[in-house]
Image (spheres, helix red, strand yellow):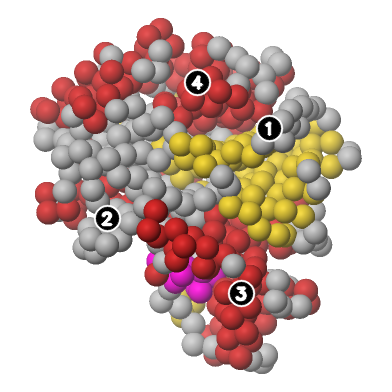
Amino acid sequence: MLTDRNDVEDLSEDDSITEDEYYPQRLAHSRFGVIATAHEQATAAGIEILQDGGNAMDAAVAAAYALGVCEPMASGLGGQTMMLLHLGKTGNKVAIDGSSRAPNRATPGLLRDREMRRGLRATTVPSTPAVLEYVRRSYGSMTLERVLEPAIRLANQGYRISNLQNFLTRRAEKFLRSGPAGSIFLKNGEVYPVGSLFKQPVLAETLHRLLKNGVEDFYTGEIAADIYTDMQTNNGLLHEDDLARIPWPIERRPVSGRFRDGRLLTFPPPGSGRVLIEMLNILNHFKGSQWDLDTPRGALILAEIIRQAQLDRRDRPYDPSFYPQVQEGEEHIITPKYARQVAHRLKRQIKTGGETTHLSVMDKWGNAVALTQSIERVFGACTVTPGLGFLYNNYMSAFEYEDISHPYYLRPNAAPWASVTPTIVFHGRHPWVAIGSAGSERIAPAILQVLLRMDKSAPLDAVSAPRMFCSINKTVHLEVARMRSDIPRALLRAGYQIKNREPFSFFMGCVQMVMHSKRGFTGVADIRRDGSAGGI
């Protein structure tokens, strides 16, 4: 990482900096627009576009490409991207479903468990290039050359390895070392030290090919041919016809709920927005004093609500393209009637005594973007096509392989299940907060906790505050050292198991939030990872 963004060209590959010299900007304010992303170089790319006259969609696309360079273990050209847009000029709200697609020749019996997690057979058809280009063409104002420029420059010039990236690479080292990804993400066979400069000239060339030949090249041109050749040589599942069915995104209607005195729009299935709405609906049946997350009762209520929402999502899966599921699957768990039933039961039960990346952008024209993209697990499939330089996703692990009636059962060209929850909260007709997080099934609970704290806390404090998560098996993950000591005791008495997570735990997600008020725009980046916020 860099202490000064202007020093990039002056640093040789042998230069290093100590961790305490790296201080990403977590809080930003501007009268003209802000962006918060999971890495300061991606934030810088978004600011550059906004300053050059681009709108929030342009900035989001540029920052998303940049994140694929400087946060490669979480996203990139080999993954998928979901977006929630509010268009200031028309007032339209659009969910951009950028699901990747299963290969046409993939069947449940064909894959062993390890093949769903790592290697070329673990990957679905990447959708990120198609999604970002669709949004740029449909809602942006800048050329492909302009939005790709920061990412190409960043790949060529390099960026500094953070403590977090060093840790994650060490965790995946044996899988990276066993294949072609090791030649890119390891330095002479070893993990890049903290502060060392990491350049990706092969990825820069791939991005330049996209610029020169158009994004379609990824699916029907030279890049597609390289992908197919690698798949054929190394027993992968993607064929030319899989890629040629370009996974352009589907525009869907966001799901809607109430939050405080405003309206909340969030991502529909295959994302997890309805989990967030269900939790908010249930909480509305508890008194405001019971929402205090820093008390034993508040923590117990939240644990029960998170667990119930996770159970409902698993028990009532819904695929928007699987129409027989619509009435039972989507509508039931987000109705006020169901929330009343659950709240009534929880009140009787409770006695007193979750890799992914996200960015959020707002601009001076009233546009707001919440964008979540991923290659599924950290480092995805842990493999690359040597001449292309990006990691493939391992979304084949996100399908159902046993229950053929399940809407996310593996079938040709199917979309995988996702936990993304990009969200926009409105005051009246105007966007107030655009928010989202990384963290798999922890995403919706992380967003919920930040929103609940917004009444009493400053934005940065709301994002930085201690978090919790409750799994289906009644294990509560807590940043114990930052919470009252009677909270874990109360949860233990109620029959929960406690998993003690370190302060500002990576496990608890990474919220990126921007907001608008009469005083201007504010951006906040989560201290739990390498995020930063910036304004023009």
| Above or below for 249 versus 435 | above
Q: Which residue: 65% across, 65% down?
A: 280
Q: CA distance from mark 1 to mark 4?
A: 25 Å
Q: Which callout, 3 or 4, points at the residue further toward the start of the chain?
A: 4
| Residue tagged 1 | 87
Q: CA distance from mark 3 to mark 2?
A: 30 Å
Q: CA distance from mark 3 to mark 1?
A: 32 Å
| The one of 324 and 397 positioned closer to us in this rendering | 324
Amino acid of disc 3: Lys
Number of the front mark, 3 or 1: 3
Q: Secondary structure at mark 4?
A: helix
Q: Which residues are magenta?
A: 306-314
Q: Secondary structure at mark 1?
A: loop
Query: Does any portion of residue 32 appear in the rendered image?
Result: yes
| Residue tagged 2 | 409
Number of the front mark, 4 or 2: 2
For residue 368, which numbered disc appears in the image? none
The local crowd at label 3, few if under 14, some if 14 to 19, many if 20 or more residues have their Cα within 10 Å, is few
Q: Which residue: 52% across, 50% down?
A: 268
For residue 337, which numbered disc appears in the image? 3
Number of the front mark, 3 or 2: 3
Amino acid of disc 1: Leu
Q: CA distance from mark 3 to mark 4?
A: 48 Å
| Above or below for 1 versus 438 | above
The local crowd at label 2, few if under 14, some if 14 to 19, many if 20 or more residues have their Cα within 10 Å, is many
Q: CA distance from mark 1 to mark 2?
A: 35 Å
Place of residue 109 in the rendered image (x, y in percent of width and height, measured from the top left): 12, 54
Q: Which callout, 4 or 2, points at the residue further toward the start of the chain?
A: 4
Instruction: Examine the image and state in which quarter residue 287 appears.
Output: bottom right
Q: Which callout, 3 or 2, points at the residue further toward the start of the chain?
A: 3
Q: Secondary structure at mark 3?
A: helix
